[in-house]
Image: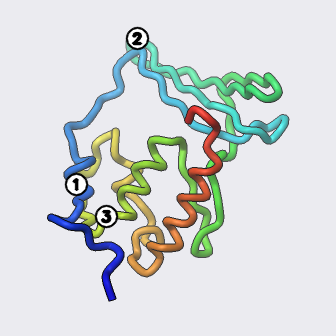
Amino acid sequence: MPNRLRRPGPPLRFRQLHDREPQPLRPGTRESILVACPRCDGCARLVTLYSEDTPPSRTRRMHCPACGAIREEPIGLRYWLRTDCCGHVLWATGAEHLRELEDYVRSPLRERLRLFLPDRYRIARLPRWLILARHRDEVLRGLARLRRMLPTGG
């Protein structure tokens, strides 16, 4: 019986894809997270803008294209990309985070990344239930459900 995870050639190494030099947050950088709108429960974007002030500060703003809701510095928002998986809640902040999770879970060689670098804290601190090999198929199905929930354009 062939092993579904074997690929021709050397095994896919997650570290080769993602263990790069750290990407510091520069002034003017924008981060976007998909959240559920508190007004209409549709998909909204929470954008964080890092200012060029000294000391650096950040401004957070939520905008929902469905109902037009805008909130400055919102708190308590629920992630848009969430689903039940293995008795836990599986979530992602957006398309890039979802891609990183898919790459990590699919990878047969999950080497530890260099910790405490600001651009990879999400992967370095994954919960144990998510990285167990026995949950791999169910987690991949959950990630596929999250992929279908992404708004068009990402």
Near mark 3 (Cα within 10 A), the count class, few <14, some 14-19 or many ≥20, is some
Q: Is residue 85 above or below residue 99?
A: below
Near mark 2 (Cα within 10 A), the count class, few <14, some 14-19 or many ≥20, is few
Between discs 1 and 2, the one toward the N terminus: 1
Q: Which residue is mark 3?
A: 107
Q: Secondary structure at mark 2?
A: loop
Q: Which residue is mark 1?
A: 15
Between discs 3 and 1, the one toward the N terminus: 1
Q: Position of residue 33 (x, y in %)?
A: 56, 36
Q: Which residue is mark 2?
A: 52
Q: Position of residue 117 (x, y in %)?
A: 28, 42
Name which residue type carries label 1: Arg
> Which image quadrant is residue 55 in?
top left
Q: Which residue in the rendered view is the most extreme toward the bottom?
A: 1
Side of 101 relative to 59 (left or right): left
Side of 28 relative to 152 (left or right): left
Asked if disc 3 and disc 2 are in contact, CB closer than 8 Å, the reply is: no
Q: CA distance from mark 1 to mark 2?
A: 32 Å
Q: Residue at left 84%, top 35%?
A: 39
Q: Is residue 23 above or below residue 18?
A: above
Q: Position of residue 101 (x, y in %)?
A: 43, 55
Q: Which dot, 1 or 2, sits closer to the camera?
A: 1
Name which residue type carries label 3: Ser
Q: Secondary structure at mark 3?
A: loop
Asked whether 50 or 33 is in front, the reply is 33
Q: Residue at left 62%, top 51%?
A: 148
Near mark 1 (Cα within 10 A), the count class, few <14, some 14-19 or many ≥20, is some
Name which residue type carries label 2: Glu
